[in-house]
Amino acid sequence: MIERWGRAGGFAAVALTAVLWAGAADAEINAHRAIYTMTLGTSRTDSGVTGARGAMAYQWGETCDGWTVEQRYKLTLSYAESQDVVIVSNFVTWESKDGLRYRFNQKETRDGTVDEEIRGEAQLDGPGKGGKITFEMPQPKTMTLPPGALFPSAHTILLLAKAQAGENFVSRQVFDGATVEGAVLVTAAIGGKVQPDPNDPLKAPILQHPGWRVRLAFFPADVNEEKPDYELGMLLLDNGVSRDMLIDYGDYTIKAKLDSIEPLPKPTC
């Protein structure tokens, strides 16, 4: 799992994935349901953020023609000079197994008031080609996707394929429907292979897979911006499961700790 995390605690899922092309044909991605606990990691004095607490439920399921993701979370952010802010988000997506079609639906509230609601669909004209995004909300509009852009599942598959091949850097335009910006640049630094921990306290067979330390940088849509909006570090297993994560906003970080996980069955097609 790779997450698109918004500024100041707004998060949007980037889907878990399955094999979309021959380069990752030996991957065995496991659909699953997981629960994460979110807490504040580090915080600079001038950030104003003094605490964070919450939980995220994540479910990735497989259908005969695609992959579904449902992410629901509640996060409370505490500030030194203002009241706590409670953020609740529901994010649901579907991506076709050929990586060419994508539907997205996100609703986020802050302190009980709807802060953002985004819904629409996107389609690529073919592998490596451009395409079109159609937003139904917050207002009807269309945007183009550049050639080579990827949806979240295809992006995760690419990372796993590159990691298996021993490559250390990947840079791609990715669209996930988390914002109305369109595709954004995501760069990934991939570390060495990490073997599974036989003494993992969760004792879940789905976690007994090797993986790689991955550091993602999410850049703003404005190509003139040189610094990423935020970075995400994680241990990404070769079956698509993401172990504990760290979201780095520069002036503070948020930890997401995996508390429980269970595999989901494959469909009968």
Image (cartoon, helix red, strand yellow):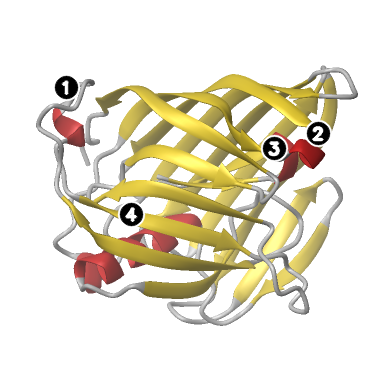
Residue name at image x 52 percent, y 81 percent: 129
Q: Residue furthest right?
A: 81
Residue name at image x 41 percent, y 62 percent: 154
Q: Mark 1–mark 2 contact, CB under 8 Å? A: no
Under tag 2, what secondary structure? Answer: loop
Q: Nearer the viewer, residue 161 or 117?
A: 161
The residue where tag 2 is placed is 48
Picture layout, residue 135 above or below residue 228: above
In three-dimensional space, the C-alpha distance between marks 4 and 3, rounded to whole angstroms, equals 24 Å
Q: Residue furthest left?
A: 198
Q: Percent position (x, y) of residue 194?
A: 20, 51
The residue where tag 1 is placed is 203
In three-dimensional space, the C-alpha distance between marks 3 and 2, rounded to whole angstroms, equals 17 Å
The first of marks 1 and 3 along the sequence is 3
Neighbour class for label 1 at 10 Å: few (<14), some, many (≥20)? few
Q: Amino acid at mark 4?
A: Arg
Under tag 1, what secondary structure? Answer: loop
Q: Nearer the viewer, residue 74 or 263?
A: 74
The residue where tag 4 is placed is 213
Q: Amino acid at mark 1?
A: Lys
Under tag 3, what secondary structure? Answer: loop
Q: Amino acid at mark 2?
A: Gly
Residue name at image x 35 percent, y 64 percent: 190
The first of marks 4 and 3 along the sequence is 3
Quarter of the image with the N terminus in it: top left
Left or right, 131 with respect to 45, comes to: left
Left or right, 239 with respect to 43, comes to: left
Q: Nearer the viewer, mark 3 or mark 2?
A: 2
The residue where tag 3 is placed is 10
